[in-house]
């Protein structure tokens, strides 16, 4: 009897559904269901009210449509007997959060609240809460809040409390009507099962919680926002481990989807973290990079190490039983896209990559810092900016493009050095995401510059695959996620090995890179900060 | 009775002839005579022999054609009575040099030598003698040669001795056949007059001579190139002052040109230095910038000041009776041209300047160092390279273009600060050259960033105008060049005044610029040097 698990990945513009064969490890081609409303960043549905700058919302109806349309479609496409489906797992963008009423429905689906913009789910890239984040950061620094260290010294406006406090500040009536303020990944699981649970991963990485240290004190929140005195009233304080079964499908939903009522749904996952499992990684010593618009790096380790500049560290945050570490680079695909649209005329990525591949290591004479969106790890400094050195009147567009690809790899080496220098050995890299699949040159540069082998798994749809694995564990198909990962591992990864001549050249350049990194990013960070401050002042006039 | 002087400017691609009215100060539109052979950098005329990399030659026949065709044409166009012409002056690119036989003719016009590439005039931008210059520099440094200080610590491969020693090394038979190795500006005057004289300006700025200190010792040359023991045998040791009369036109040439035999020809000038007179400047305190492919800066001063990083200083070198200082920036028009051809798609300078003009001071958040061809003054370091800081995914092509224009103005301020910090007050700027005429934004930025008024003279063809003024002095129309400049001064210069708000913003940015200048250009110059070295090594493999 074959055994399957369903994985559903909720992205920024669409959802993707696949079926994972739990014995062969093979997965079906995904069914992609685009969101009708996409990213709501201009006008509110129905009322047409214009949204302020930096707003980004979504419609929960788009998410449920992914399930209702996508699951039956995926079963038909793959000719899978629904009776063979044991489990279901989801992953979501994060921190994407929504206010929910006491009936479990999103407030934006209540007639009374639908016309209020704060009633809608705030997408991860909703950045309008930056002033709230600035205040939370400065008060935490003033008070020497120890929780800040788990987040590398700086919290993001994208996270849970900035988005929640934004409502508390701007629409108190709506805030009072909220029964729970949920991560979308938790809410969609409650919609699937009728069971309201929250998992520990987002509580830890996005909502300041730690299994060992709990939450920051109420006094901290009160100091930052006097009157915001009950910070966890919309969040709760109970969080379950990843891989836990939330419950079976709601019977009426199971019928609608054509699935047995016995299908077990796992608690929600997050698209980046679930990629560790999806990429087939379960052991310490492997650095997992999800390379797309930006880079999310993850690694697991038996001990907790306090790393300067890390995005977050959390016990059980990625895989149960180990500490999960998150790091990252803030501008990757969007920096390359910027170059193509701003400076490359009509030449596209493929043509630039082909031309850049003809250039040898060190031949450009160029060196770049990929700080176009600031530096996430290890400087955690959004006020840094991109730098390009070594320009001559012989510099070509392809050489500059190559220098930008190299800047991604140098940034990565600096992050990996930081892990190693603090006692976490990292022996190899597993890379996934759009750029890992589409840019062999970037992968070779990461290998040459990090001096480590880079594998790109043969499977696509890594997040959905990881979600399906957690669904399988929840359904009892495997005793734990580690076993599930090993049992479904697929050979055939594309492997990029460091070239010894390239390593020598890049080691010399990296010596220069590291010196400049310290000067521009640390000892004299006031130079790049100054340019941003002057720019902000000039724009105001 | 009207009085006229003829000015002839020998450029890189063409010659230009104009008539200057010595009473009104007005000048005729120029007659432009393109060189038929242009820059000879691919194949030798007649033989078709391929030239090595970095070679750049010219054909003396192209120069004489400028005179024979251009002078009668200019007289006709301006309806000037030839009898009213008193003087004639020329200026030339420099260091453009040629070997001449004992009959006064260029060796390339002798059948015996015409097929040998070293027989041809070497244009200023002939760079094949770089290894000779490297050797001359290193031996001068080793020996602590004091002459090096007059050239800011480094001599150029474009200068007289590198080009002469290149012949001595590579074609000894031809070297031995040379009667004199002449600056083109001196040779063309000998062709006009039949009198062989050399002026002091190029002897000083290009051939290591000083009126006070003479030449470097023979022992220095012998140490650098054993056997090259008589350095001045092809150059001579007698040099006459600028504005000296070389003599009247050769009678047969005067008839051919339709000019009276009484027309007096001045000794030769150089296009950059003669621009000081051409721009109407005769007093200390004014900084003259000739802004084209690169920038040549000039100033005169009563005393000799030893300035670090200056290109050259010479008594009587620009105007008689004062010390002439030369400085410069190595990449201006060609850096902007590089941007347009490499990174701006189909958008041209005019459109970019219009867009860049809409941006306010400081609004780009960008800062650039114009070291695309290294830094000429004050670091005298060809191994530096261009740097661009402050990039974000919002940076536009127009913003980057503006940052490049600003980099020209910041580089200029750094040079002017260097003069002032060493005791030479500079109160105002007079700018000429293509970019001064075509880019009002660059002129405004130079005003705002230097905090000085910038004037762009109403007259075009500044070098030819200056040459005509020296011709007038040689002919006795004025007692000296200072009087000639004042008597022909024309009002109506376009003036750019510093904007006080812009000054404040740019002062803040300049603080950052200056710190970075010292770190990237001095204390940690090994970073940019390292990138060039790694590049050179990579290209060799």
Image: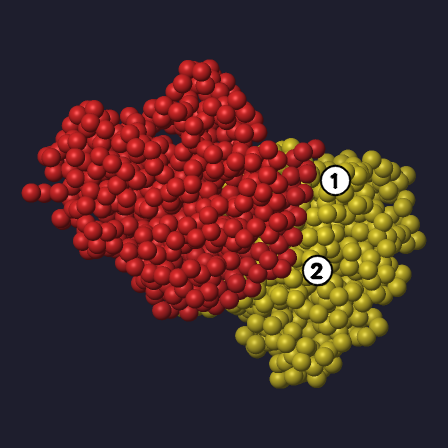
Chain colours: A yellow, B red
> Marks 1/2: CA distance?
25 Å
**Residue toward you, A43 or A297:** A297
Residue A302 sits in quarter? bottom right
Name the residue furthest right: A479
* Chain of residue at mark 2: A
**Residue toward you, B286 or B151:** B151
Residue A74 sits in quarter? top right
Report the residue marked by disc 2: A377
Task: Name the spot of residue A506 as percent of width and height, x first.
Answer: 72, 45
Q: Is residue A533 visible?
A: yes
Task: Name the spot of residue B388 as percent of width and height, x first.
Answer: 54, 53
Choose the circle earlier in sequence order: 1 or 2.
Answer: 2
Q: Is residue A446 visible?
A: no
Sort mark 2 into few (<14), some (14-19) or many (20+) by Cα contacts within 10 Å.
many
Q: Are marks 1 and 2 on the same chain?
A: yes
Residue A502 is marked as: 1
- Asked which secondary structure carries label 2, the reply is loop
Residue B422 is marked as: none
Q: Quadrant of the C terminus of chain B?
A: top right
Q: Quadrant of the N terminus of chain B?
A: top left
- Asked which secondary structure carries label 1, the reply is helix
Task: Name the spot of residue A479 as percent of width and height, x first.
Answer: 93, 53
Task: Name the spot of residue A516 as percent of width and height, x first.
Answer: 66, 57
- Residue at the (81%, 67%) spot, across then down: A306
Sort mark 1 into few (<14), some (14-19) or many (20+) by Cα contacts within 10 Å.
some
- Residue at the (47%, 51%) spot, across then down: B213
| Side of B360 relative to B51 (left or right) | left
- Residue at the (87%, 43%) spot, across then down: A488
């Amino acid at each position: 009897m074959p055994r399957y698990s369903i994985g559903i990945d909720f992205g920024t513009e669409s959802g993707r559904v696949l079926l994972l064969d739990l014995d062969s490890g093979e997965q079906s081609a995904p069914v992609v269901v685009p969101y009708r409303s996409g990213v709501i960043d201009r006008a509110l549905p129905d009322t047409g009210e214009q949204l302020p700058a930096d707003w980004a919302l979504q419609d929960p109806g788009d998410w449920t449509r992914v399930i209702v349309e996508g699951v039956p479609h995926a079963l038909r496409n793959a000719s899978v007997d629904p009776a063979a489906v044991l489990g279901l797992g989801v992953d979501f963008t994060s921190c994407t959060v929504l206010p929910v009423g006491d009936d479990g429905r999103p407030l934006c689906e209540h007639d009374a609240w639908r016309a209020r913009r704060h009633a809608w789910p705030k997408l991860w890239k909703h950045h309008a809460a930056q002033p709230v984040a600035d205040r939370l950061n400065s008060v935490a620094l003033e008070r020497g809040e120890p929780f800040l260290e788990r987040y590398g010294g700086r919290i993001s406006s994208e996270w849970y409390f900035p988005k929640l406090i934004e409502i508390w500040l701007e629409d108190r009536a709506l805030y009072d009507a909220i029964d729970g303020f949920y991560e979308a990944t938790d809410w969609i699981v409650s919609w699937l099962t009728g069971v309201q649970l929250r998992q520990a991963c987002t509580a830890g990485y996005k909502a300041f919680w730690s299994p060992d240290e709990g939450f920051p004190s109420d006094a901290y929140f009160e100091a930052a926002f006097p009157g915001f005195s009950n910070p966890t009233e919309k969040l709760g304080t109970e969080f379950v481990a990843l891989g836990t079964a939330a419950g079976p499908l709601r019977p009426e939903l199971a019928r609608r989807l054509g699935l047995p009522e016995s299908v077990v749904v796992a608690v929600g996952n997050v698209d980046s973290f679930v990629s560790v499992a999806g990429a087939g990684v379960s052991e310490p010593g492997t650095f997992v990079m999800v390379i797309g618009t930006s880079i999310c790096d993850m690694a697991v380790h038996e001990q907790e190490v306090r790393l300067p500049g890390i995005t977050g560290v959390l016990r059980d945050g990625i895989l149960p039983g180990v500490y999960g570490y998150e790091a990252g680079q803030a501008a990757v695909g969007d920096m390359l896209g910027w170059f193509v649209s701003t400076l490359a005329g009509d030449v596209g990525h493929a043509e630039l990559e082909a031309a850049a591949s003809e250039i040898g290591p060190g031949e450009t004479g160029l060196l770049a810092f990929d700080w176009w969106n600031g530096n996430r790890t290890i400087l955690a400094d959004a006020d840094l900016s991109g730098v390009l050195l070594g320009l001559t009147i012989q510099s070509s567009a392809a050489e500059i493009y190559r220098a930008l690809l190299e800047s991604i790899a140098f940034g990565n080496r600096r992050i990996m050095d930081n892990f190693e220098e603090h006692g976490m050995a990292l022996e190899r890299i597993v890379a996934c995401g759009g750029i890992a699949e589409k840019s062999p040159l970037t992968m070779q540069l990461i290998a040459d510059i990090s001096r480590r082998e880079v594998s790109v798994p043969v499977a696509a749809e890594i997040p959905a695959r990881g979600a399906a694995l957690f669904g399988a564990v929840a359904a009892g198909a495997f005793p734990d996620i580690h076993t599930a990962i090993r049992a479904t591992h697929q050979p055939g990864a594309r492997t990029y090995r460091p070239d010894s001549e390239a390593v020598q050249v890049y080691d010399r350049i990296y010596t220069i890179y590291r010196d400049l990194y310290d000067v521009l990013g640390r000892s004299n960070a006031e130079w790049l900060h100054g340019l941003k401050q002057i720019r902000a002042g000039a724009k105001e006039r």
